[in-house]
Image (spheres, rainbow, N blue to C red):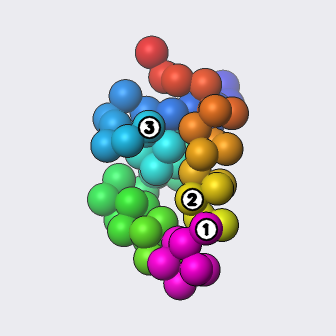
Amino acid sequence: MSKKLKRSSDKMIAGVCAGIAEYLGFEISLVRVAYVLLSIFSAGFPGLLVYIILWFVLPENN
């Protein structure tokens, strides 16, 4: 059985980072912190744009 990348029900905003953490088997808080740091160091806009795209593309985990 293969895993599927989905948004998590453990949401802060849309569940994207939590879904990625669950898929990869990482701690949710670490993925959120890493994402914020990556967004800050990439001038913010690309990180925000990717998050919004993933918000609409990834199905929600019910």
Mark 3 falls on what kind of element?
loop
Residue 29 appears in the picture as rendered: yes
Instruction: Verify CB contact (< 8 Å) between mark 1 and mark 3.
Output: no
Establish if 50 lies above or below 46.
above
Question: Measured from the top left, where is residue 61 in percent x and y?
Answer: 49, 22
Establish if 42 lies above or below 23.
below
Mark 2 falls on what kind of element?
helix
Q: Residue at x 48, y 78 (%)?
A: 40
Instruction: Verify CB contact (< 8 Å) between mark 2 and mark 1.
Output: yes
Between the residue at mark 2 and the residue at mark 3, the CA separation in whole angstroms equals: 12 Å
Establish if 12 lies above or below 42.
above
Q: Disc 1 residue type?
A: Phe
- Residue 45, numbered circle: 1
Q: Is residue 58 left or right of residue 37?
A: right
Residue 22 appears in the picture as rendered: no
Between the residue at mark 2 and the residue at mark 1, the CA separation in whole angstroms equals: 5 Å
- Between circles 1 and 3, the one closer to the viewer is 1
Residue placed under numbered mark 2 in the picture: 48
In which quadrant of the rendered view does residue 48 lie? bottom right
Q: Give the quadrant of the C terminus.
A: top left
Q: Disc 2 residue type?
A: Leu
Establish if 43 lies above or below 26.
below
Would you call the spot at circle 3 few (<14 residues within 10 Å), some (14-19), or many (20 or more)?
some
Q: Disc 3 residue type?
A: Ala
Q: Earlier in the sequence, mark 1 or mark 3?
A: 3
Q: Earlier in the sequence, mark 2 or mark 3?
A: 3
The segment highlighted magenta reads 39-45
Question: Measured from the top left, where is residue 1 in percent x and y?
Answer: 66, 25
Would you call the spot at circle 2 few (<14 residues within 10 Å), some (14-19), or many (20 or more)?
some
Q: Is 42 covered by the magenta stretch?
A: yes
Residue placed under numbered mark 3 in the picture: 14
Viewer-proximal residue among 49 and 59:
49
